[in-house]
Every structure is written in C-alpha cells, then in structure tokens.
Image (tube, rainbow, N blue to C red):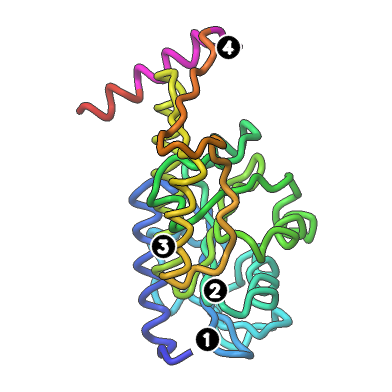
Amino acid sequence: MSESIFSLKNDIVQVGKRMYERGYVASNDGNISARIDSERVLITPTGVSKGFMKPEDLIIVDFNGKVLAGSKKPSSEMFMHLQVYRDRPDVNSVCHSHPPYATGFAVAGLPLDKCVLPEVVIALGSVPLIEYGTPGTEEFYKPVLGKLKDYDAFLLANHGALTIGKDVLNAYHKMETLEHFAKIAFIAQQIGYVNTLNNEQVKKLTDQREKYGIRTNVGCVSCGESDGQSCSTNIPDEKPGDDLIRKITEEVIKQIRR
C-alpha cells in the first residue's frame, strides 16, 4: 500500500472514535485492521476501548499472527482479519463492530437481503446472515469465508457485523451504510409496509455498480416484477410479540423526533 503506517494508524484511531461515539461498540468491543503491505497488517489491541485508542496502541503483525511491533496484545479476532486479506487481495481494511440495529437483525436471524434502498444496492448489494460461531475461534470466521468473494458486509448471528473495503474509511463507511439500512428496515417493518425494488430497477443499479468498479455480486432479492413499479409488501398485522415490538417502536420514534 502507498499509505504510510502513520497515516493508517491515524485513520484507524479516528474510525475507532467514530464507532464508539455512534454506539457501534461498547466498552472494549470491536476491532479494526488495515493491510500495510503483502507481509504486514496493522490491527487494534484487545482490551482497549475503540473510543480512547492512541496511535501507539496499535500493533503490527505478520500474516501468521506474529507481533512485529507494539507492546499490547492484538485483537482476539486477528486471524479472521488475516484470513480475509488472504482470500480477498482487493481488501485493505476490515471493520468489526456491534451496531444495535444491524446486530438486532443478526440476533433475530434475519439477513438484510431485500433490494430496498438504491444507495445500499449500489454500495453493499445484499447483506447475508452468517451462522454463529464462538468468537475468537476458527468456527467464528470460517462460515464467512464461503461468502467472502460475493459480499462486502455480513451479519454475524448473535454477535454483530463485519464490513470490508479498499481502505479504512471505505470499510467503516460500509458499516455506517449497513447500520443505517438496518434502522430504516426496522422502522418500515414496524409501520407495516416494505417496498422492494423490481428487477428492472435493480438492473439499472447493477449497471452503476459496474461503472464504479464494485466487484461483488448484488445478491439482493427484488420483487420479480419488471413493469417499472416497486412492490409493496404488507407485513402481517399479527406477529408474535407485537405488543412488545409496538412499545419498542414507539420509544424509537420518540427518540428520533427529539
């Protein structure tokens, strides 16, 4: 990479602060990394809040996980990051956090796979749900690898979210896009209607993805129509836990209006 290690450290520190301020992580949660070159990776330490990191807290490791520089212990999810870099040469940064709305979908076992928002179709396509694995182990990240070539954002069942990108800010911005999409999807579902884009509309967005050089598949589910109209899905009135969901939604709307 052409960027200096100093610049990469500053980018990671700033993204860590932004994730913490936006509530994407709590306490010492989350991890961020950046590929330095073909032999080295810069990664956040374990046991340090992403909102209070300093450049000197970051660690340089090789692709075997050996610490080359830094006094702290690297993230327990380090090997997930390293494997992403091995399998996706175009990826230069990995971002993992627990944004509330996206994580809510992950806990509910629901992928964000509908073609709903044009910006999301272009930037992310579809966001698959990855089966649960124990954090800090191979079983945590191995299920991601089977979908890695087709997606840049993932919901990790009962855990959080993962995004990857060409640089630190790109990977983080995909996390913002994912969380924003999850929040809008949640609100629309509680209102009772979700308009899904049709095949023709999605095709036009796919063409834009190609123009911008986005290599992953779209993968989102369109409504199957091609008459220029989107399709409205009426969410059933009666669902398990409707009363509780309604109360939660009312509180969310109150917060939004403040």
Residue 37, x across and y down, in percent: 56, 89
The residue drawn where x is 35% and y is 48% is 22
> What number is the disc on residue 36?
1
Secondary element at image label 1: loop
Mark toward the viewer: 1 or 2: 1
Q: CA distance from mark 4 to mark 1?
A: 49 Å
Which tag, 3 or 1, sits closer to the chain's start? 1
The one of 73 and 10 positioned closer to us in this rendering: 10
Q: CA distance from mark 3 to mark 4?
A: 38 Å
Mark 1 residue type? Ile
- Identify which residue is drawn at 52% across, 44% down: 199
Residue 215 locus on image (x, y percent): 55, 69
Crowdedness near tag 3: few (<14), some (14–19) or many (≥20) residues, C-alpha within 10 Å: some
N-term mark: 3 or 2: 2
Q: Which residue is mark 3?
A: 208
Residue 72 lies, with reference to residue 148, above or below; the image says below
In the rendered structure, which amino acid carries the disc numbered 3? Gln
**Mark toward the start of the polypeptide (4 vs 1):** 1
Q: Measuring 63% from the left and 47% from the top, which residue is drawn there?
A: 128
Tell me how far mark 1 sits from mark 2, CA to CA.
10 Å
Write down the quadrant of residue 187 in the picture: top left
Residue 239, numbered circle: 4
Whether the residues at callouts 4 and 2 have beta carbons within 8 Å, the answer is no
* Disc 2: which residue: 43
Q: Amino acid at mark 4?
A: Lys
Q: Main secondary structure of the magenta part?
A: helix
In the image, the segment drawn in magenta is 238-251
Tell whether position 131 is magenta: no
Instruction: Kindly check if marks 4 and 1 are in contact, taking CB atoms under 8 A apart as contact.
Output: no
Q: Which mark is first along the chain, 2 or 1?
A: 1
Q: Amino acid at mark 2?
A: Ile
Q: Judge depth for marks 3 and 4 and give the one in front.
A: 3
